[in-house]
Amino acid sequence: MNILITGRPGTGKTTLLNKVKNTLESDGYNIGGVFCPEIRKNGKRVGFRIIDIMNKKKGILSHINCTGPRVGKYKVNLKDLNEIGVSAIENAIKKADYIFIDEIAPMELYSEEFIRAVENAFDNKKPVLTVIHRKSNHPFILKIKNRYGMLLFEISPENRDSIYNQVLDILK
């Protein structure tokens, strides 16, 4: 069973994934994949990190001051996305019990290597928990939403605790 989490910015999608990860790890499971938390400076978001969950390798997914394709006010760092993000997903397919991907959105979709790694994760038999961009009608995101065995949850401040419990029940 694969789970897709979506929702408005700031509703706790990454927080939910991290909370589920911590619970599963405390139960003895190996979690692999990527997290992309915000980078803040003086209280303002200036970019996103990319972190390999298994080996803790960190890089910059996007930033207002890096070079690469533009998404809003950010530019995507394809080098770190491919080197850290793709290898994290590939490693998770080989070694993890669960694969987490935060997130599949316009920034990540600039990388064909990342798209292939995500497809490989979903083709694998291991459960995948991922955040997807809420409003995207990108063909790849639509393809993911329509795959067999996908459950889609839209998170909000009001339902995030109940979604956490539902996700854990499904994954266990």
Image (cartoon, helix red, strand yellow):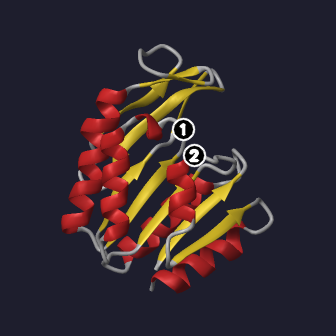
Could you tell me residue 86's position as x and y percent?
Answer: 29, 46
Closer to viewer: mark 2 or mark 1: 2
Residue 55 vs 22, above or below: the answer is above
Q: Is residue 102 left or right of residue 56?
A: right
Name, please, the residue furthest toward the right. 158
Dividing the picture into quadrants, the one containing residue 90 is: bottom left
Q: Residue at x 38, y 48 (%)?
A: 115
Q: Amino acid at mark 2?
A: His
Q: How would you rate the neighbour count of disc 1 (Cα within 10 Å): few for under 14, some for 14-19, many for 20 or more?
A: some
Q: Amino acid at mark 1?
A: Pro
Q: Residue at x 53, y 79 (%)?
A: 168
Q: Is residue 32 visible?
A: no
Q: Is residue 47 left or right of residue 156?
A: left
Quarter occupied by the C terminus: bottom left
For the residues labelled 2 and 1, the Cα–Cα distance comes to 8 Å
Residue 47 vs 83, above or below: the answer is above
Q: Residue at x 35, y 29 (%)?
A: 78
- For label 2, the residue is 138
Could you tell me residue 140's position as x and y percent?
Answer: 49, 51
Which one is earlier in the sequence, the residue at label 2 or at label 1? 1
- For label 1, the residue is 106
Dividing the picture into quadrants, the one containing residue 126 is: bottom left
Residue 112 vs 29, above or below: the answer is above
- Residues marked 2 and 1 touching at CB (< 8 Å): yes
* Element type at mark 2: loop
Along the viewing direction, whichever of 41 and 134 lies nearer the viewer = 134
Q: Is residue 168 visible?
A: yes
